[in-house]
Amino acid sequence: MKNIALLMQLVAFIMTVPAFAKDGGDIQGGGSDGCGLGWQVTQKKSLFATATRGTTNSFVPPTFGMTTGTIGCDKHKITKNEQKEAAVYAETNFEMLSDELATGNGEYLVSFAETLGCADAASFGAMTKANYNAIMPSYQTSAAEMLQNVRTQIQSSDLNCSVL
Amino acid sequence: MKIALLVFNFFSILCSAESTIENLGNSKQWKNLLHYEKRFFIFPERSLADGGDFFFSDEGRSDPVKELVATIDALKENKKIIGPLKQTPLCAFPARKKFIEKKLGLKFKNTQCKQLNEFKKRMSTDSISLIYSTAYPENPGSMFGHTFLRIKSNHQTKLLDIGISYSAFVPKGEDGAVYMLMGLMGGYRGYYSVLPYYVKVNEYNFSENRDLWEYELNLNSEEIELLILHLWELETTTWFDYYFFDENCSYQINAAIEAVKPEWNVTNFGLHVIPGESVKSFTNQKGAVSKVHFRPSLGRRVSQRIDSLSDSQKNLFEEVIQYKADPLSLNDPDLLQALIEYFRYQRLDQKEKFSKKDQQTVQKIRVQISKIKSTAKKIEFTHNGRPDFGHHPYRLGIGYGSTNQFNFIDFHLKFAYHDLYNRDLGYLPFTQIDFPWVTLRYDIDSQALNLERFQFFRITSLTPWTRFKKSASWAAEAALVTPKDDLCIDCTRFQLEGGYGLSFRTEPMNFTTALLGTLRVEAGKSLPEKVRGGPGIRILALAAPASFYKIGADLRAQSDLFQGNRPLFYFPISFTQSLHFNAWSDIRAEYQAWVPGSTQGTFNRQWKIQAHFYF
C-alpha cells in the first residue's frame, strides 16, 4: 500500500512537469465603448494556447471582433473617428514605437506614420529621431502623451500628415 | 401539334433546369461552401457545420441539392431572420448569393447589408497570405504551430493588414485536464477572430518568440472577395466544434480557402491536421504560393544580434546591463541596437517585474540612439528552414538487430511528429514531440512476436541556456515498455518519466549537451514489488556534423528504490547515429546497453539498424 501511495506521489510530481502547466486562456468579455478596438494581446501562456487565443475577438456582435477597449482610449483627445486608429496603434505598439522613434526607422514606425496619414515615412522618422527628447521626455512618458507630443511636433514641422 | 410541341419544350426546359440544379448542387464548390466532408472513406458525405442557421433545408446537412434549391428560394424571398446578427438570407449568405448568381445567371435583389459592409470595408482584395507560426518550444499547447490568414487592408504597410484566425472558445480558468479532454473530444466551439496583423505579430514574434512564415497565396481579387464573404457566412450563421487533432485551426482555414478555390486540394488529411502539413498542402499545389517571407521572432533577432558583436562589444554590453557603464557614453550603433533589442526582450519577458532602474537605462539608450547619426548594420537572420521543407509526420520503420540473447526484426509505426535524431530542417532543432508510436519485435530465434514498446507520448525541449537568456530544458514521457536491465524478456510495464534541467549549445554543428534531473516510475506485475523507480540523472549529448547527419549519446543513472535485493542503481546508455536522405526517409544505427549497478548483475546490450519512411 505504501508503495502505491508513493507511486501516486511520483506520478503527481511528474505530471506537474512544465509540459502540463497551464494557467487558463484569457477571454475578455464583450461590450463596446467609445474606442472600440479591444485589440490587445493576451499574454497568458496556456495549454493549447494557439487554440484559446484570439477567441477574444471573434467577429460576433456587437461590433465584429472589436471587444472592449481596456486600451485606454479615454486618455486620448479623440475628436474624429479616423484618429482612433493611430491611438489604438500607439497604445498597442508603444514599446516598439518607443525604440523606433529613436532610431528613426523600422517597420513599426513606418506603419505609425501611415496611421497618422503622413505621406513620407522617412522624413517622419527623421523628425522623431531629431525630436526624441521632446516626444519621449522621460521613461514614464505614456503612449497617450507620446502621441500628443508627436502631433505637436508634426504641427511645428513641414511634414504633410492628414490625420491629426 | 403546336400545343404538344409547346408542352414538350416546356418539359425539356424544366428538365434541363433540373439537371443544372442537380449538377450545381453536387458540384465540388457548392459542397465546399456547405463544408461537406467525407470522413475516413466509410462515412457518408456530410457537412461539418455543427449549429445555427447554416441550412435552409431540413436535409441540408446531408443533401446538397435540396439545400441548393432551398437556398435559392430563401434568397428570393429574403424573409427569414438568421443568426445572432438577425440578418436576412441575402446579408447572411453573400458568398452563396454570389456563387448562385454567377453559376445560374440569376440576379437576386440588391439589399443594403450594413453589418457586412462594416466588416468588408476594412479589407481590400489585393492580396491574401497564409501565415504559419512555428512551434512554441516552451508550451506544448503550441507544439505543432498554428496557421491563420492575413488579408491586405486598405493601408499600405503589412503591419496594418488584417489577421483572421480560427480558434476554440475556451471559458476562462478551465482546468488543464478538462481542457485537454474537451479539446480532443470537440467539447469547444471554434470561432473566427479578426485582428490587426500587428497584434498577431506582437503576440507570436514578441510575446511567444515564435517565428512567422508568410505564404502569399495566388488567389485573384474575385476569389479573395468570395473568401471574405464566405468567412462572414461561417462566423455569423453557424459554428464548428473544435477538435484539437483534426477539425482544428489549420483544417478550417484550409476548408474555407477550398470553398473559393475548389481546384486546390488542401483538405485531404489523415487522422490529424498538423499546421506545418497544412502549409505543405498549399506548396504542393502548383502555383498556389506566389511568395514566401520570413519574420524572425524577437528571441532570434536578439540572440543573432548579440552573436554578431565582437568580444569587446560583448563585454561592454555586459557592463551596461549590469549598470557598470553609462549608455550615454556609447557611440557604437551596433552595440546600442543590440542593447535596445535585448531590453525589449527582457521587458516582454519580465513584464511588471521589469525594474525601474532598467527602464531608466532603456530611456538613456534610446536617447543616445536618437543622438548618433550612423545606424546599426543590417542582419540577415538565419532560420531553421521553411516549414514546408520539413520531413513528413507519419513514420513507418523496419529494423534488424541483436541482443545478447537473440536476433530480432522490429516493426515500427509513429503517428507524429519529430524526434531528436530527425532532420531538423523546418523544425525547431533538437526538439522532440512524439505522439503515439508502437514497435513490435519479432524474435527470430524463438519465432515470437512481442510488443517492444508503445509510446503514448515523449516530449523533449532543449532550449539552450545562454549568457543573456536563461531557459530551462525539460522532458516528459509515458510508455508501455519491455525493460532490458533485469532480463525480463516478454513482460510489459508502464513507465512514466519527467526530467528538468539545463542545456547548452555551441555552433558549429549545433553541438548540444543537456543535464537533466529525472524521476521515473515503472509499474508491472513482473516486478517483485509491482513498482520501482526513483530519481535519476540524464546526460544528453547531440550534434549535427552535417545537414544530413546526426549523432548523439544518452547516458543515464537510474535509481531503483522499490527494490527487493536489486542494486540501488543501474545505468541505461545509448548511442545513436542517423543519416537523412530527404523529407521521406532516413536510416539509423543504435547501440544500447544496460549496465548493472553491481558486479553480480548482467550486462545487457543490443544493437539495431532501422530504416524509416515518412509520409
Image (spheres, coloured by chain):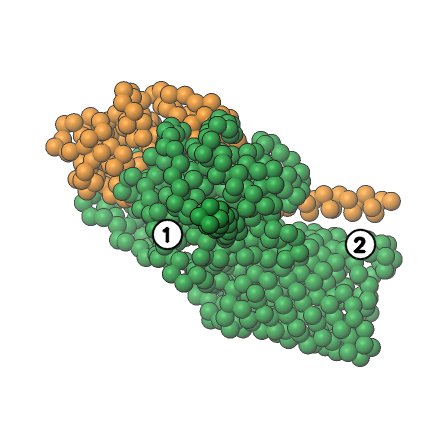
Chain colours: A orange, B green
Image: B246 above or below A100: below
Q: Residue at x 55, y 36 (%)?
A: B56
Q: Which mark is residue B167?
A: none
Q: Amino acid at mark 1?
A: Leu
The residue carrying mark 1 is B219
- Mark 2 vs mark 1: which is more N-terminal? 1
Name the residue that disc number 2 marks. B523
Q: Could you tell me which residue is drawn at 27 percent across and 20 percent down?
A: A79
Q: CA distance from mark 2 to mark 1?
A: 56 Å
Assign the N terminus of chain A to one quadrant of the image. Answer: top right
Between B234 and B534, the one nearer to me in the picture:
B234
Q: Is residue A73 left or right of residue A27?
A: left
Residue A16 in the image: state x and y as whole percent: 66, 43
| Disc 2 + disc 1, Cβ < 8 Å | no
Chain letter of mark 1 equals B
Residue B197 in the figure: left or right of residue B237? left
Residue B114 is situated, as x and y percent measured from the top left of the image, at 38, 28
Name the residue rendered at 64%, 62% in the picture.
B414
Q: Does residue B101 appear in the picture of this structure?
A: yes
Looking at the picture, which amino acid does disc 2 mark? Ala
Q: Which of the chains bears the disc numbered 2?
A: B
In terms of secondary structure, where does tag 2 sit? Answer: strand
Above or below — where is B485 with respect to B70? below
Q: What x and y, as percent, mark residue B155?
A: 28, 39
Disc 1 crowd, CA 10 A, few/some/many (<14, 14-19, 20+): many
Whether residue B6 sits left or right of residue B585 in the image: it is left
The residue that appears at 47% across and 71% down in the rendered structure is B546
Residue B211: x and y in percent read 43, 51
Residue A25 appears in view: no
